[in-house]
Image: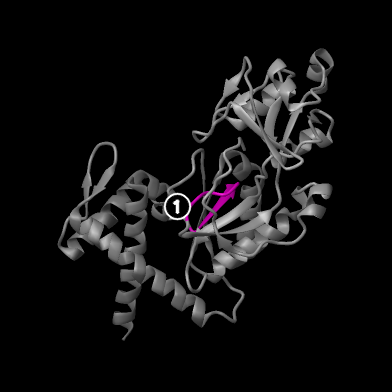
Amino acid sequence: MLTKSKELATTSEDLRFFMRVAVLSSLTEVARELGLSLPAVSKRLTLLEEKLGVQLVRRTTRRLELTPEGARYAEGAKPILSQLAQLEEEVSRESAVLHGSLNINASFGFGRRYIAPLVSQFAARHPTLALNLQLSSQPLNFLHAGIDVDIRVGEVPDSRLVARRIAANYRVVCASPEYLQRNGTPQRVEELSQHNCIVLRQHEADFAVWRFNKAGKELRQKVQGSLTTNDGEVAMRMALDGHGLILRSWWDAREAILAGNLVQVLTSYQLPSADIYAVYTHTRQVPKRIRYFIDYLHEQLKEYASVDFQERQETDEPERPLCSGSARQQK
């Protein structure tokens, strides 16, 4: 009996190991994620192939490609691992101890500033849970990226996913006091055409058009300026240095505005919201580690919404499928 149990445990670990190989397509990345040496990971893959008697991957100089047998093995592993995770949740439902692994994705800016510290705190509370946080500059193909929870600014169209709003967030237009003193403060959206606007190119969005709403009427204003970047932190630095107006999420501009280093303008207009969502796949029984982590983020991120905005948005939204329209504003 002990031998059989050990074989079962080894088999489940083999499945988990190969799923990371299939998702990351790089033994170097797998080694980095698992904290192993590259030779150790390569040997483990070789032993798995020998055990199964088939070649699972084709090794090239740049990346790994699954063989037909490897693709079939990975596809079959998904429901097995899902059932194992669900079984573990059911038998330990009464326990507050979290087991297994949790793979999290977030954007570089918001992930570094807010999510990474919270992941560290959550790890300290749950030492038996393995946490993996990756940061990305582009939205992921969630269903094929091996991610359990994706932290997103704004909503993304995919009916197969579920989103829970974990923090209120909105967009603002702002500039440094020095810039406004030199160039004046715009009072109407149309006046943006007379200003130097710092343009942020991200996610194939219509980055040169800023959208507003007033009295139920949508207003679109094409903007331009002498500075363009694809990085939010660079854009903020340019604004702080007095180069022009910028459109950013409240989470990014909050500290600079509260410190007086940036001044919010066009406050009589509303901009499309960019609330923070925790996104995950729809399952009959959401794993406890996912539920606990999302609850923790929601509780910790409440304070980052502004007081006025939080009062208007106090009622929490239920978990629901993501809508078909995505926020295309800059985040």
Q: Where is residue 57 in the image (x, y as percent from the top left)?
A: 22, 51
Q: Nearer the viewer, residue 140 or 199?
A: 199
206, above or below 197, in the image: below
Image quadrant holding the C terminus, namely: top right
Q: Is mark 1 on a helix, strand or loop?
A: helix
Q: Which of 213 and 301 is in front in this view?
A: 213
On the image, the x and y values in percent for residue 174 come to 75, 29
Q: Residue type at mark 1? A: Phe
Q: Is residue 271 visible?
A: yes
In the displayed structure image, the side of residue 238 where residue 159 appears, left or right: left
Rendered location of residue 123, percent (x, y): 60, 59
Q: In which quarter of the image is residue 252?
A: top right
- In the image: residue 3, left or right of residue 267: left
Residue tagged by mark 1?
142
The 10 Å Cα crowd at callout 1, few under 14, some 14 to 19, many 20 or more, is: some
Total number of numbered discs in the rendering: 1
Which picture quadrant has residue 313? bottom right
Is residue 328 depicted above or below 90 in this figure?
A: above
- On the image, the x and y values in percent for residue 298 come to 68, 59
Residue name at image x 58 percent, y 56 percent: 278
**Magenta region includes residue 107:** no
Which of the image's four quarters has the N terminus?
Answer: bottom left
- Relative to 34, does residue 59 appear above or below in the rendering? above
Q: What stretch is highlighted in magenta?
A: 148-158
